[in-house]
Image (cartoon, helix red, strand yellow):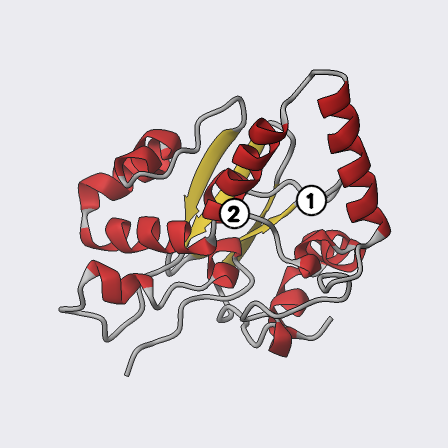
């Protein structure tokens, strides 16, 4: 597992023109649901469009707002769904969302050891490495080693807490605001926040 390629989105095998076996199975299921009258093609397309609108940019906006508005941060940490809705991010549904804050004393990391539960309603689809057996098995046992592969290691003395997502609870990290960002706007701050920092494998870097 190499960290160098994990700090940005990039194409993965199976995302080109040739459909993967998994994609073919999904399409077959969609066709069956339409034929049985469970869903319409339009409802399926609406759901796809909804998921496509979810991206790490939503999490970045939430983090930037929390960095600049203490009252909003408190709402984000205590009632994530309501706080997200304030910014137009609809995370409603049966799944509970919890935002945990990184501090000078604690660094948080998210994993799903059983499958790939992820805050999709806010961040969209998880990256391939998050779903991999290697990450799911190692993040709990050796979180610092995993983070080193993403070119990040919390300083000695900082406690690392690993949060295991479930079908009922999804987590997102509120990274620490980096030094040197005084006077920056929310939009400028949001541009600093990466998907990986919202998962916890990295922290937002210092701005010089």
Image-based side of 53 in relation to 63, left or right: right
Position in image of residue 109 (x %, y %): 56, 53
**Quadrant assignment, res 2:** bottom right
Query: Which comes before the other along the chain, label 2 or label 1?
Result: 2
- Residue plotted at (35% across, 68% down): 192
Tell me the number on the disc at residue 65: none
- Mark 2 and mark 1: Cα distance apart in space: 18 Å
Image-based side of 137 in relation to 118, left or right: right
Image position of 80 with respect to 151: above or below:
above
Q: Secondary structure at mark 1?
A: loop
Position in image of residue 195 (x %, y %): 49, 60
- Residue plotted at (60% across, 27% down): 168
- Residue plotted at (32% across, 34% down): 85
Q: Residues within 10 Å of mark 2 (few under 14, many from 20)?
A: few
Pick the quarter of the image with the N terminus.
bottom right
Q: Residue furthest left?
A: 183
- Residue plotted at (50% across, 68% down): 154
Q: Residue furthest bottom?
A: 208
**Quadrant assignment, res 84:** top left
Q: Secondary structure at mark 2?
A: helix
- Front one among 31 and 181: 31
Image-based side of 120 in relation to 15, left or right: left
Image position of 36 with respect to 75: above or below:
above
| Residue named by callout 1 | 116
Position in image of residue 139 (x %, y %): 68, 56
Position in image of residue 184 (x %, y %): 18, 68
Q: Residues within 10 Å of mark 1 (few under 14, many from 20)?
A: some
| Residue named by callout 2 | 52
- Front one among 154 and 24: 24
Image position of 21 with respect to 104: above or below:
above
Of the residues tagged 2 and 1, which is closer to the observer? 2
């Amino acid at each position: 597992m190499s960290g160098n390629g994990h700090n940005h989105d990039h194409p993965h095998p199976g995302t080109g023109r040739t459909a993967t076996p998994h994609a073919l199975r999904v399409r077959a299921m969609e066709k069956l649901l339409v034929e049985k009258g469970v869903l319409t093609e339009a409802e399926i397309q609406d759901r796809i469009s909804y998921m496509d609108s979810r991206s790490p940019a939503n999490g970045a906006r939430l983090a930037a707002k929390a960095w600049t508005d203490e009252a909003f941060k408190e709402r984000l940490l205590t009632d994530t769904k309501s706080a997200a809705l304030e910014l137009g991010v609809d995370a409603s549904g049966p799944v509970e969302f919890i935002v945990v804050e990184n501090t000078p004393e604690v660094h948080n990391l998210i994993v799903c050891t059983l499958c790939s539960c992820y805050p999709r309603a806010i961040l969209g689809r998880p990256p391939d490495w998050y779903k991999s057996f290697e990450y799911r098995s190692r993040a709990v046992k050796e979180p610092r080693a995993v983070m080193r592969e993403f070119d990040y290691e919390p300083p000695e003395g900082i406690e690392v807490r690993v949060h295991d997502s479930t079908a009922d609870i999804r987590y997102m990290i509120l990274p620490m605001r980096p030094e040197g960002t005084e006077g920056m706007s929310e939009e400028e701050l949001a541009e600093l926040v990466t998907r990986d920092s919202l998962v916890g494998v990295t922290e937002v870097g210092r701005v010089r």
